[in-house]
Image (cartoon, rainbow, N blue to C red):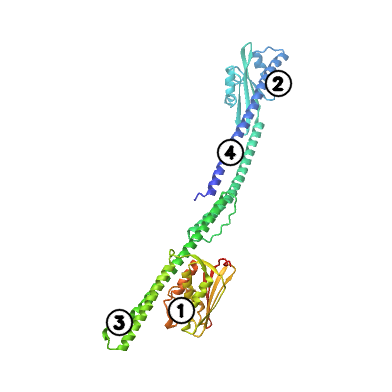
Amino acid sequence: MKWTIQYKMVALFSIIVFIGFSAMLIISYRMTEENMYRTIHEDMVDVKTKLDIAVNQYFLINRKRMSSNSLAVEKQALAKEIGSVVDGSVVIYKPDGQSFDYTEESRASSFNASPELAAAAKHEIAYVTYLDREQAIASLAFPLESNHTTIGILRYQRDYSELYQRNLRFQNTLEGFAVVLFIFIFAASVMISRKITRPIRELTQLSTKVSQGNLNVDIQIHAKDEIGELAGTFTAMINRIREQIDVIERERDEVTQIQARSKTFFDNVTHELKTPLTTILGYAQILKDNGFTDKVFFDKGLDYVIKESQRLNGMVVDILDMSVASTTNQTYRMKQVDLSGLVQEACEDMKVKASKYNIVIHYEVEDRMLLHGDREKLKQAFLNVMDNSIKYGHVNSIISVEAYRQHNLNIVIVRDKGNGVKEELLQRVFEPFYRGSGMAKEERGSAGLGLSIVKSTVEYHGGTIVMSSRINEGTEVTISFPGGEYEQV
């Protein structure tokens, strides 16, 4: 059997109580026994004095000389008279301790061969207490002397059975009370120990569940003691483990997403670089084989090689820009920037490209908007957003740009009129190389890195970028920066 804390507490407490009660009973036995023997001793001393007086008075009253002969004659009368005086049984014996009425039966008597008679025969005063089951008899014997000569032995016996039985009843009552009290204390100790150890058992069960991986345990222990503190510490430990597991799971998911994005990035880079290289290699091989025999095809091939080389160069530049934007140690030349003038300048720069597709850029910019940042990188971000709007906007449409302050924010909104972007694709447009199917016109295609670079730049400046879109209506890009103070005029 497993010795639990409850069993140990009950066993230890029971042993202590048992030892205590046993000691109490032993002490009470000894005290009652000593009291009984003290009472008998005091009675024997007092009776001895009374017997001496009674014997002398008997012979004086009867005007007889005290001698061995007179004692032998008056033994029965003397024993009867003084026995009534001292309330007990009196027997007169010869100086050697033998009865005057000597027979074999008297020799066989248990009291006749007693040690007090033997002591009295040696001229000593002695008494003995005889205990037999529920009977107690005190027997006193002393020599009777006349003229310094022992003429006989007087033996006095008194029954103390009532006192002895009273002591036995008291001891039995005390034993019964001790047994009942011990049972009560034992039962109470079992209940108390069970109540004390119940939180420990609960914690043990809960810790077993936790060790099996179940962290969704509810600890309902509110004791204001060490066990309560242990339960609180255990709860805090479980919560801490949950937090760490949540962190590990989030990091695991983030690593998985990063790995997936890295693979997508690698696949897209490979695809995007392979396409122009294939075109360049194909035309170069044909031109090498045909030489200058076909002037028209030769010029067309060179145009394709130049065009694809320029596109390849642009993609490499975009990849380098994105790599720089994603590093934490890239250099930003931070200073106060006139955001109002910067937005207007970007709009004017993009009007030339927009005019190729008969797209008009209309802007409304609030004056004196200030921002602490890198002017060149911010301008490149606005150019990329507007370039994206030109690529995916309808021909003969309008791109509207608004810049204003709202509360403590500088807000720039770029709207175009185009096919729009599906809701499920909006969160992915900021991923490197991502281009939804059918989003870009073929002649305006790019590597798909612009919005990713824009997002990195905006977030470095403490801002946010959000894209919303409606199919066949257009797309809206909202960029928000923490605002500076208005310029003092």
Q: Which residue is mark 3?
A: 284
Q: Between tags 1 and 3, which lies in front?
A: 3
Which quadrant of the figure has residue 119? Answer: top right
Q: Between tags 4 and 2, which lies in front?
A: 4
- Relative to 224, say whether 269 is above or below: below
| Crowd band around label 1 with a 10 angstrom C-alpha radius: few (<14), some (14–19), many (20+) | some
Q: Which residue is mark 1?
A: 436
Task: State whether residue 97 appears in this view.
Answer: no
Disc 1 to disc 3, C-alpha distance: 32 Å
Q: Between tags 2 and 3, which lies in front?
A: 3
Quick check: 483 left or right of 46?
left
Q: Earlier in the sequence, mark 2 or mark 3?
A: 2
Residue closer to the observer: 66 or 349: 349
- Amino acid type for the residue under numbered disc 3: Ala
Q: Which residue is mark 2?
A: 81
Q: Which residue is mark 4?
A: 20
Residue closer to the observer: 316 or 137: 316
Disc 4 to disc 3, C-alpha distance: 111 Å
Disc 1 to disc 2, C-alpha distance: 140 Å
- Amino acid type for the residue under numbered disc 2: Glu
**CB contact under 8 Å: marks 4 and 2:** no
**CB contact under 8 Å: marks 1 and 3:** no
**Element on which disc 2 rests:** helix
